Amino acid sequence: MNTISENLEPSLHKRKLKKIAVFTSGGDAPGMNAAIRAVTRAALANKLKVVGIRRGYQGMIEGDFIPLKSSDVSGILQLGGTILKTARSEEFRTPEGRFKAYQQLKNAQIDAVVVIGGDGSFTGAQVMSKEYEISFVGIPGTIDNDMYGTDYTIGYETALNTVVEAVDKIRETARSHGRIFFVEVMGREAGLLALTSGIACGAEVILIPESTVQTEELNSFLRKGYKSKESSGIVIVAEGDQSGGAMCIAEEARKAHPDLDVRVSVLGHIQRGGSPAAKDRVNATRMGVAAVDALLDDQHSVMIGIANEKIVLVPFNKAVKLNHVIDTNLIEIHRLLNR
Ligand code: F6P
């Protein structure tokens, strides 16, 4: 992997920043609060003032800022969602919107900003930092785990556990009734959550946008293995699968195999909620501390990542432009066990 700095752990030399801001942007993800807490406390430990920006870039435009003290981030580590709230801002996409946002940061004497979000959020930061003298460092927060340059994004572990718990329950009713369940998992453009949850649940078929081979597997699964009314099975469908999502695929299956008892379950936003898993808390904490450290080391326009369990810095232009490539071994493993 190409990173500008590998194996970076918090260093001790600190530059003279005075006030930083932190905010969450795009889809929320469990563990974002742990990151807010870590950024706040690491900054305070380095004698920086900290401001929380509420409601993402829209709040930046409107100057919706709150000072953050250590006690303000107490008791939030275990909470899902984001205490700073989040939003997707159309106004920030315009030069006028970004000018307003810059004015607000300047008036509040904010020197640098930590943005917690996905690629859309980092693209916004990249554009603004080219137009104005403001440093951004990013922390990847999305349940999709689809960012280039990092093995983990905050929220993925929790969402994975949520999906597994839900599908295990669906499996019980599927077995009892001899039904085929098409379960739709989030991931508009990314199938990793579907793939790994499918493996963890022993799903018979997994359909993801990054691969088309499984469509044939679905057909043979429906044709061969499940003729008996007593049989049951789980087909995991990533939301963004090109075949049209679980509803469409199930409809096709019903038409082609009227003898099958088919049901659909769309897990939806339940996957974005819940108390963060331990790994998300630990990773969010490490990334939060590393983000402050990066700013103090005069870094900007970089995402904090974790690769091979080590903190790394990934330039925004790589993090947002390059794709997180799905490990095809995972697909092969699943196929091997479900022949
Ligand atoms: O956070 C990423 C994600 O969960 C995608 O997997 C999903 O397609 C999208 O967000 C849905 O977001 P929203 O409902 O907030 O538009």
Image (cartoon, grey):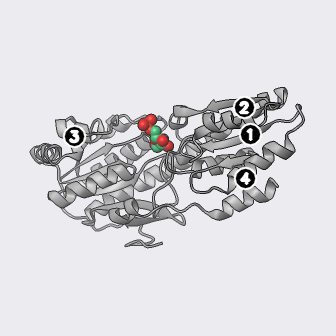
**Residue placed under numbered mark 4 in the picture:** 216
Which secondary structure, mark 4?
Answer: helix
**Residue placed under numbered mark 1 in the picture:** 234
Q: Residue at x 38, y 62 (%)?
A: 321
Q: Residue at x 75, y 47 (%)?
A: 219
Q: Could you say which disc has been placed on residue 207 in the image?
A: none
**Residue placed under numbered mark 3 in the picture:** 91
Crowd class of label 4 (few under 14; some 14 to 19; many from 20; radius 10 Å): few
Distance in Å between CA atoms under marks 1 and 2: 8 Å
Q: Could you say which disc has been placed on residue 170 in the image?
A: 2
Q: Nearer the viewer, mark 3 or mark 2?
A: 3
Amino acid type shown at disc 4 = Glu
Which secondary structure, mark 3?
Answer: helix
The mark that comes first in sequence, 1 or 2, is: 2
* Lateral position of residue 152 relative to residue 52, left or right: right
Query: What is the x, y in percent for residue 27?
Result: 41, 40
